[in-house]
Image: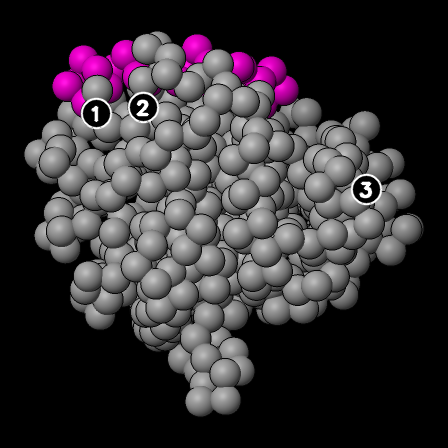
Amino acid sequence: MRALNSLNISGSDVLPLVEGGKGISATNGASAGAWAAAGGVGTVSCVNADNYDENGDVIPQIYHGKTRIERHAELIQYGIDGGVRQVKDAHDIAGGKGRIHINVLWEMGGAEPVLEGVLNETKGLVHGITCGAGMPYRLSEIAANHKVFFHPIISSARAFGILWKRAYQNYGEWLGGVVYEDPWLAGGHNGLSNAEDPREPQEPYPRVVALRAMMNKFGLENVPIIMAGGVWYLRDWEHWFDNPEIGLIAFQYGTRPLLTKESPIPQDWKERLLTIKEGDVLLHRFSPTGFYSSAVRNNLLIKLEERSERQVAFRNKAGVDEAFNTEVHVGKKRYFVKEDDKEKVLKWVSKGFSTSMRTPDDTLIFVSEEEAESIRLDQKNCMGCLSQCKFSNWSQNPDTNYSTGRGADPRSFCIQKSLMDIAHGASLDDNLMFAGHSAFNFAKDPFYSNGFIPTVKELVDRIITGD
């Protein structure tokens, strides 16, 4: 493979290898610092980042507020404190090498105050911000005010064009790179638009070529594109090197760094990664963000699939719609459903799914009484981890009385609780396990034979060879 040339990213020449920022304790100061020390760009996740006590133990993020607004304020402070700690750790470990970025989701609860809070307390330690999951118009202004580079995460040339024209052109000198995240291959939340079919993936090359053409039209020839999603063997991307259609290019690794000694995820999670087979990662839409996302298809996702399958449309009264005139009783509740659906409902109830829960779409789902209690408790304990949440109907917008205006959707789940739990040692089967669609390579790549887990430096050295 051809030599991998350095590239100016966030103000310094570094290896064009970027650690993807994985939210909620899956990327931290230890992993980011090690990646930067190896000569690349390390990324500290500032999504519910961990903080530590004087003994070095993780401080549990326990919420004491009686209202969601009070708990939301606690969430923001936890985010700032944890982010500051992780950035300082990354800076110390990097030892002046590489670059340190921080990553936030624009649609996470309190994204702006968390960003401002972390940057205010880490001046000179952060070189760039990566941000996606939404349209982060104010990202450029915040970055420029703190004199750090910004790297928006987008999934189409069209999305970048909108961001540039509406906001980013005013702060173009601080645009450090544009992360193209492939919506069919990347792990975590994906930027599929309503016009794109999740079942018909498109090749990244023409989409990135279109992005470069648009960037060149805006005079951004010297701004690198960072390819994210589906990147495993660098040799597979060699035809992108020194390619005038692609221009300056770097590569982001999200899934591979999970399996390193410095990775903060629990050991049993690392061992599970070695067993993932092709097709085990599911592109689904159960996330309370409303975005598609990719994760290992485990018990949690199977339960969510089954929960949505036990679903029928209904009316509260007969005669409202002539198709809904068949009466059915579920416990003490009475509904009117289509004639063909009554038998389904009675079958589900007989199997123990005897509790009905309404969705915002005038449908009912059927769950066990125990599962209904768990859903309601999680909704009650909402701390506003998203700017707006399908699962709890929370919105951080005071103008809407902190509500999305729609009912809470029991077909989703509390993503913050699930990600916190899995990152800190809870069940791998019953919590959300984000992963990219190339994760099956762990089981096939000879680098990981006999359960070998490399250091970050060993992984980066391996990647540079093309493997």
Look at the image and give the residue range highlighted in magenta: 194-220
* Residue pointed to by mark 2: 248
* Residue pointed to by mark 3: 345
Q: Nearer the viewer, mark 2 or mark 3?
A: 2
Q: Are marks 2 and 1 in contact (CB under 8 Å)?
A: yes
**Label 3: few (<14), some or many (≥20) within 10 Å?**
many
**Disc 2, SS:** loop
Residue lying at 42% horizontally and 19% vertically, measured from the top left = 241
Name the spot of residue 351 as percent of width and height, x first. Answer: 90, 51
Q: Quadrant of the N terminus?
A: top right
**Disc 1, SS:** loop
Residue 258 is a magenta residue = no
Please name the amino acid that badge 1 sits on.
Asn
**Disc 3, SS:** helix
Q: Nearer the viewer, residue 384 or 418?
A: 418
Q: Is 18 left, or right, of 11 in this rendering?
A: right
* Residue pointed to by mark 1: 222
